[in-house]
Image (cartoon, rainbow, N blue to C red):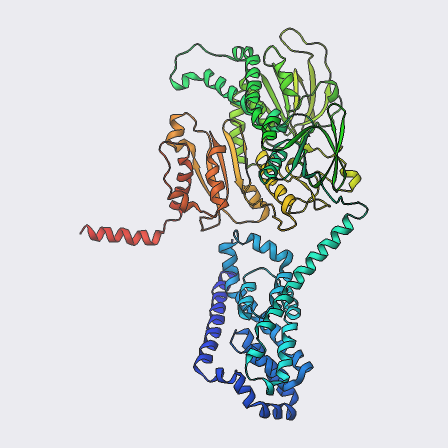
Amino acid sequence: MNSPTAHSSRPLSLLMKLLVVVVVFAALWVYARSDASQWLSLASLKAHAAGLASWRVDQPWAAAATFFVVYVLVTAVSLPGAVWLTLAGGALFGLWQGLLLVSFASTTGATLAMLAARFVLGDTVQRRFGERLRAVNDGIAKDGAFYLFSLRLVPVFPFFLINLLMGLTQLKARTFYWASQVGMLPGTVVYVLAGTQLAQIDSLSGIASPGLLGSFVLLALFPWVAKWFVAQWQAKRVYSGYSRPKQFDRNMVVIGGGAAGLVSAYIAAAVKAKVTLVETHKMGGDCLNYGCVPSKALIKSAKVAHQMRYAHTYGLNHAAVDHAQVAASFPDVMKRVRQVVTAIEPHDSTERYTALGVDVVQGYARIVDPWTVEITDTDGGVQTLTTRAIIIATGARPFVPPLPGIDDVGVLTSDTMWDALAALPSAPQRVVVLGGGPIGCELSHALARLGSGVTQVEMGTRILPREDEDASEVVAAAMQRDGVTILAGHQAVRCEPGEPSGPGHQGRAHAIVVIHNGAEKRIEFDVLIAAVGRNARLSGFGLEALGIEVGRVVQTNGYLQTKYPNILAAGDVAGPYQFTHTASHQAWFAAVNALFGDFKLFKVDYRVIPWATFTDPEVARVGLSEAEAAAQGIAVEVTRFELHELDRAITDSATAGFVKVLTKPGKDTILGATIVGAGGGDLLTEFVLAMKYGLGLNKILGTIHTYPTMGEANKYAAGEWKRAHAPAAVLRWVEKFHTWRRG
């Protein structure tokens, strides 16, 4: 709740801003209407030079103080005449005293002008265009002093315009002051020195000549050239001890054939670079072979089984399909999963990428030095390639928690479960899934619908902890209806190998022991699946020997460069997200920076990252959640539309879920969106596009959506926001108007 003091300070702040604007415009008006412009001219200075010099001799302190104050006021209000005053400083006070006065007066006035612009417009501009200015603000925070210094070196750029624009950024005032002080010094010296020779100056053309201005431009280029030399010097230090080849076998070597590696190699080949892609195991990486593709094929079969079981919901008279019948079809389901992977494999195959111009090698790659990669192929042969750039795209592997006894019970992960499940004669009767994140929820829900008895163990208080609680609750309810036993708040403590199981069970009746509120509980299982996260593949590629810093992932800068600028990382191995689509997104930046970084570097844009969990209903999100907004202290307004009010959801008997949009209070600017419902991952795209390009809810509301579709939910959510912001006072007057019109 806002305090009375805060409320009372707002009108005062507005009044002060108005006062500043009035003072500036009044000064400009007085200047334009008076003879001040005649005073601040070269002719006037020359005409009054003798009198001013006499005044300066008679009252040196008063003359200096008056000159300083006048200069500060002229520059603070952005009046024309700073050039003439600078000349006057040299004429009156000589080179050194004039330089001292002008240098500090000009910087002080510029800083006051910058602060005035910030006070009047800064908050408004940042509040209204903050999202669009984020890149500018980041650049100013990192290199603002450098940019300002370069601009100050060139008198061609309008003095007042630089002050105004810098006031609208978040550059610190003290940084603005010293960068201006130093940057304006060379130009100030030239003009003050010219002022000492005032009698010999007939016009400004002698001072502001093309040659002199060209010299200033060259001077402004100096810091950029110096920055380049510093970068070269730093690179020389980094690469010291290594011998750079005079020629290279490749422009790029990519290690890893997953999403990030494939896209990087594709881009390199598309721009006619010579590129080698090294993959140890299967092309397509985890997504094609162990993750996205097989899991979504399994989920589809599970959804069909669910619809068959509940066909009566759609008015169909059928023989009931029970869990036993579905479980018996499990081998055919797993066969279809394999067929789906096989159908997609050509998209990521060696043959396809070879045809695109990529040299694909099956083998193990090790970085020998910053420009050399040693590749051991599957037959044991070794080849060594020199390359200008290297991209590390080695992905991640499933993490298996170090529980006592877990290695003795045959724990499965996403890497190993597909072959193990395909070998079973029917769906496993008792499955324990460790982990309540997206992977754990997807597998638990799908296996339960395919006839398994599934127990999901989550150490946290609820499943899907990264999502808002209302989203987790909807998914948990759906999973429990389909037979999943969710044990949230339960910590696995050990595994116990069991004796051979009785008839009807596969393998051995192992057990896992969990603890909840201090009490232990033993759960028997036929299959144990660990879905508690993934660790980046970091070892075995030569990173340690090169001193490339690694932690949870390979440490990179904003351009995906490692310690060595020509060695970059992308995908799961680089973080911060472990999604196929972010790996592909990073790959563009990695490839372009690797190939063309000597000319231009592109910083990775993580502003709008979507993701989805493919349970039924799905959970999809982009931007902030309510919990994240609260944790970060960001004020948001929440608009919600329930799917049970949507016509298409009703026709499809898919009414579970909602669309929730977070906006800036009082504005339609989208800060985040969560969709829980059938096809939520597809529906989210509209909000991703809107956030990417700064489109608000009014634009979504004004867009025609096909009827009847699930996509209308987004428009109705925008309508809910619009209804909440209807101008009540205006509507009351409109109602009176219509009443009057009726007579």
Q: Quadrant of residue 74?
A: bottom right
Left or right: 678, with 327 as reference point? left
Q: Estimate the x, y position of residue 235 in percent, counting from the top left.
A: 74, 51
Q: Estimate the x, y position of residue 547 in percent, counting from the top left.
A: 78, 42
Residue furthest to the top: 503
Residue furthest to the front: 247
Residue at position x 51%, y 85% from top? 39
Residue furthest to the right: 241
592, above or below 109, in the image: above
Label count reads 0
In this orientation, which residue lies closer to the viewer: 413 or 457?
A: 413
Residue furthest to the left: 743
Q: Estimate the x, y position of residue 344 in percent, counting from the top left.
A: 55, 24
Q: Estimate the x, y position of residue 632 in percent, counting from the top left.
A: 59, 47
Left or right: 707, with 439 as reference point? left
Residue at position x 60%, y 88% from top? 199
Residue at position x 63%, y 70% from top? 215
Left or right: 669, with 170 as reference point? left
Residue 349 in view, yes or no: no
Q: Quadrant of residue 491?
A: top right
In this orientation, which residue lies closer to the viewer: 406 or 709?
A: 709
Residue 319 in view, yes or no: yes
183, above or below 546, in the image: below
